[in-house]
């Protein structure tokens, strides 16, 4: 699949001629929106974005949600905000569920419903997507690629609306971008057959589509986070079984970690959501991209050395030895065999970048846009104790 020639993937990102910016703008300059469209609000980042929008604006937020009826759609959104301690009773009446599916043409809405939505909403935040390490591109295309095309169609239908699109830095992780060349926010993500995994590929095509939209004059801002991790104060994460959490627990279970110099730069969810909202308020963000990564990363070996100092028996070994130890533990019927199967699967998935040495990153646009704010990203070293305390308090990882 990934060995097909460039034009195959590039062609998927092309927009048809009907996508044009020459409809009247939905918002006059300096006008504040009273109707915002948000996708992915039942997800990790989407829930935090929803709360940012509710807390910092007076708009009604129309949330695309998969549900059978409005009541259960509303309940899903409320529950998700509750899960992250973000719910406030005053929010209820400003959340408007839009029952639909990114994978369907017009999100599965009738022509009248799609047109009504297009005439109503004034800004779009697109955070929805199928985030998975398992499935191939073909399975994700409808949601991650065609869903993004529908977002662009919505943005240009009736009135022109700014789009704030959540992409991913993972789209750069191929030999198209050698580790000697800095990834600037203006660096065009190029395709190379070493871009592994259906998820990354689907995000590459969708990102490229958004770049085409920018080039056509649409008001699009692209946000490219690195791995999104737990809240910087509470440690709360979207899914305890996300790859970072699973890997740390897996290493503790077998008492070994790969002695790797590769650094990781996860960004806490509160930094990402606040940064996206803040940058989205600035007209100068339109047409730009933003690299959201942790400016104070930590090498795996230093990370696990810190975990060791917290009292866990951990020994550094080579990557190969580490994989053999996981396999051995499974063969020896380790009591957490099922969990270790997940560890092995996640770490060896082509979608994972645990041991990928990235090119240097640049975040000039982010730094400029956040300069007059109090929004900063805490170092990985300072986040680790918060995350470990969270894992321990809910029993995900036993205390040493
Ligand atoms: N998490 C990361 O580390 C990371 C890093 C970089 C970029 N990103 C990007 O950030 C965005 C948000 O990620 P996340 O971590 O918040 O993901 P998430 O927790 O898995 O949430 C995904 C959201 O998308 C919705 N969704 C999925 N398929 C859909 C469909 N067919 N129709 C309508 N909605 C659908 C989900 O709805 P349901 O609740 O109905 O499933 C959910 O609300 C994604 O675009 C992702 O690619 C994430």
Image (tube, rainbow, N blue to C red):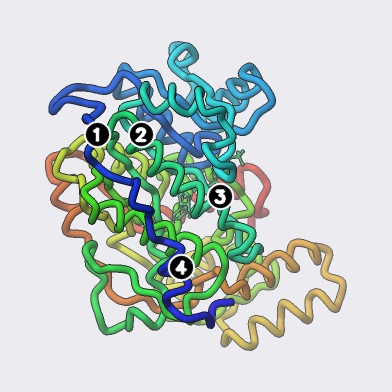
Between tags 4 and 3, which lies in front? 3
The residue labelled by disc 3 is 143
- Does the numbered disc 3 mark a residue whose Cβ is under 8 Å from ligand 1? yes
Q: CA distance from mark 4 to mark 2?
A: 48 Å
Q: Residue drawn 55% across and 41% down?
A: 105
Q: Residue drawn 18% across and 22% down?
A: 31
Sequence order check, earlier mark of 3 and 1: 1
Sequence order check, earlier mark of 4 and 3: 3
The residue labelled by disc 1 is 23
Quick one: 313 or 81, which is closer to the camera? 81
Instruction: Give x and y (percent) for residue 49.
Output: 40, 35
Q: Is the C terminus in the top left, top right, bottom left or bottom right quadrant?
A: bottom right
> Is 166 on the left-hand or right-hand side of 215?
right
Between tags 3 and 1, which lies in front? 1
The mark found on residue 303 in the picture is 4
User: Marks 1 and 4: in contact by CB < 8 Å?
Assistant: no
User: Marks 1 and 2: in contact by CB < 8 Å?
Assistant: yes
């Amino acid at each position: 699949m990934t060995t097909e020639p460039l034009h195959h993937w590039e062609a998927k990102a092309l927009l048809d001629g009907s996508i044009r910016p020459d409809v009247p703008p939905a918002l006059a300059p300096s006008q504040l929106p009273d109707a915002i469209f948000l996708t992915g609000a039942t997800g990790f980042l989407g829930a935090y974005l929803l709360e940012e929008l509710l807390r910092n604006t007076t708009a009604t937020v129309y949330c695309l949600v998969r549900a059978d009826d409005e009541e259960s759609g509303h309940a899903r959104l409320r529950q998700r905000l509750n899960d992250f301690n973000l719910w406030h009773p005053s929010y209820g009446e400003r959340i408007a569920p839009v029952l639909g599916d990114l994978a369907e043409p017009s999100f599965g809405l009738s022509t009248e419903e799609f047109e009504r939505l297009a005439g109503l909403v004034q800004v779009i935040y697109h955070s929805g997507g199928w985030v998975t390490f398992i499935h191939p591109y073909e399975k994700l295309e409808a949601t991650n690629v065609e869903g993004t095309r529908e977002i662009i169609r919505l943005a240009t239908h009736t009135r022109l609306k700014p789009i704030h699109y959540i992409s991913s830095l993972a789209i750069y992780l191929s030999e198209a971008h050698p580790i000697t060349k800095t990834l600037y926010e203006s660096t065009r993500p190029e395709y190379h057959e070493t871009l592994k995994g259906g998820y990354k590929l689907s995000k590459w095509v969708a990102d490229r589509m958004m770049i085409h939209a920018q080039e056509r004059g649409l008001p699009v801002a692209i946000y490219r986070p690195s791995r999104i991790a737990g809240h910087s104060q509470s440690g709360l994460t979207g899914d305890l079984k996300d790859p970072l959490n699973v890997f740390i627990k897996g290493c503790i279970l077998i008492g070994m970690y790969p002695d790797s110099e590769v650094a990781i730069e996860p960004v806490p969810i509160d930094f990402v959501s606040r940064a996206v909202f803040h940058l989205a308020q600035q007209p100068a963000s339109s047409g730009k991209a933003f690299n959201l990564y942790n400016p104070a990363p930590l090498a795996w070996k230093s990370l696990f050395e810190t975990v060791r100092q917290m009292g866990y028996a951990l020994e550094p070994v080579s990557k190969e030895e580490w994989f053999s130890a996981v396999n051995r533990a499974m063969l020896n019927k380790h009591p957490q065999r099922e969990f270790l199967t997940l560890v092995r699967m996640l770490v060896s998935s082509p979608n994972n970048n645990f041991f990928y040495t990235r090119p240097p990153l640049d975040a000039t646009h982010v730094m400029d846009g956040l300069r007059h704010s109090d929004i900063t990203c805490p170092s990985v070293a300072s986040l680790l104790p918060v995350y470990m305390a969270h894992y321990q308090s809910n029993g995900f990882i036993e205390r040493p």
